[in-house]
Image (tube, rainbow, N blue to C red):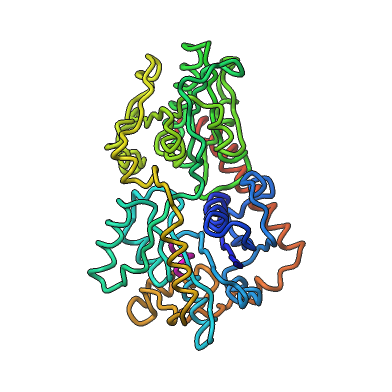
Amino acid sequence: MRIHVLADSDTRWKWGAGLAVGLAPGSEVHAHMLRGRSTPTARQLAEVGITPSSITEATLAEFAAAPVLESADVIILGTVGGATHAALHALARRFAGAPYRPILMTGYVGVVYEKMADGLLLRAGADIVLANSPFDRRRFTEVYEPLGIPASSIVQTALPFLDERPYDPARTFAEHPYTVCFAVQPSVPADRNGRMYMLRRAISHARLRPGRDVLVKLRSKPGEATTHVEAFHYQVLAEQLDEPLPPNLHFVYGNMSQTLDRTDLLVTVSSTAALESMHRGMPTAILSDLGVREIHGNHYFTGSGCVTDWTAIDEGAAPIAHESWTVDQGIRSTDPFGELRNRIAELRGRPLPPITPYYTAASAPEYVGTLLRRRGLDPDGSPGPGAAAARSRGPMRRTSRRVLKVAYQFGVQRVAPKIQQWGGV
């Protein structure tokens, strides 16, 4: 099977590539990186651990026009809602009237805790919209059916990066001490004070528990981007502290699954890493120190039995998620790709209907026009005025864009925090 993955960040490439490999092991997987602020670096791509048959970097217009899509069996749209909707319009125009077109699939990289209706309607029109759990399937159906969108497009699966290796609570610690991993997020919390608080509590825990290793698991290095802008990088904040860090506290990068292999307690505000640790049966702490709030996403975990705080962790708390909750969240799925494989086989065996995004230039002209213009497309899905300029950019122009992106991120992560610190912000 030939599967093409469009991704706009390292996280969504990890999701799309993992989905492709899990769906059809041995498939030919092609990577298309959407050119933009969060285009992953070579290091970020290598960290995922999946090597594609080919890799390109393109605008949305360039991707939709790519000749290689003619032979694609499946296209996985691993992009934010607006880009996914624009891609549906561009691909609808590309394959209009064609006797054959690939199956279009999209979904969510992690838990869906905000803007659910907005995100679902932007993804409507794909042949398959993935729900990561029975809970999500019920919620997605409640949005689609009243609006006349076929609920048959919703297919239940599970997050493809949930590792099968179970946590062994009886293991010995000959190789390493009891290890606490604080899985950080680029934008939760978003403000400097909140992030400094989290860093200080991790440092305090390391000092209170000198027999433990405390890992601060970072998503991206200073100057790199991921799905969300990280204005106050934890490693940069640590450099601004007056006191030295305890020797048992370490900043780590790399594959999350490999980090969990040495972890005994996963601590986070609301990172998807919590689903990975819960899947393994590992103690998982969802922090409530800054409140259980929709803006933080930790409200999603209220039924898990894992909501706690740093003080309780200092005192030895190591909560285990309730079994009933993990089952409903798709964390304990025994055959995550079974239904999806069946649906793919069914769709491949018959002519596919025209691609019909939910929003059109007639039903939502302002909304659709804005979404598409931002991504270099006209309201009918054709390349917009900026597309020709984008195609003409040579290697030097692309290199300049990379330099400017790194410079911007350096300013956000290092210069701006200093200015705010001096100004007492």
The residue lying toward the viewer, choosing from 361 and 336, is 336
Tell me where residue 43 appears, x and y as whole percent.
68, 45
Q: Is residue 131 left or right of residue 71?
A: left
Tally the numbered discs: 0
Tell me where residue 191 appears, x and y as whole percent.
43, 37
Residue 102 lies, with reference to residue 309, above or below; the image says below
Tell me where residue 277 appears, x and y as whole percent.
45, 35
Tell me where residue 267 appears, x and y as whole percent.
44, 29
User: Is 83 a magenta residue?
Assistant: yes
Residue 200 lies, with reference to residue 94, above or below; the image says above
Q: Residue at x 54, y 81 (%)?
A: 94
Q: Is residue 343 left or right of residue 13?
A: left
The residue lying toward the viewer, choosing from 287 and 349, is 349
Q: Residue at x 31, y 68 (%)?
A: 151
Magenta span: chief secondary structure? helix
Q: Is residue 129 left or right of residue 6?
A: left
Residue 170 lies, with reference to residue 284, above or below; the image says above
Q: Residue at x 46, y 80 (%)?
A: 350
The residue lying toward the viewer, choosing from 338 and 237, is 338
Q: Which residues are magenta?
A: 81-85
Quarter in which the N terminus is drawn: bottom right
Q: Residue furthest left?
A: 146
User: Is 24 a magenta residue?
Assistant: no
Quarter in which the C terminus is drawn: top left
Q: Quadrant of residue 397?
A: bottom right
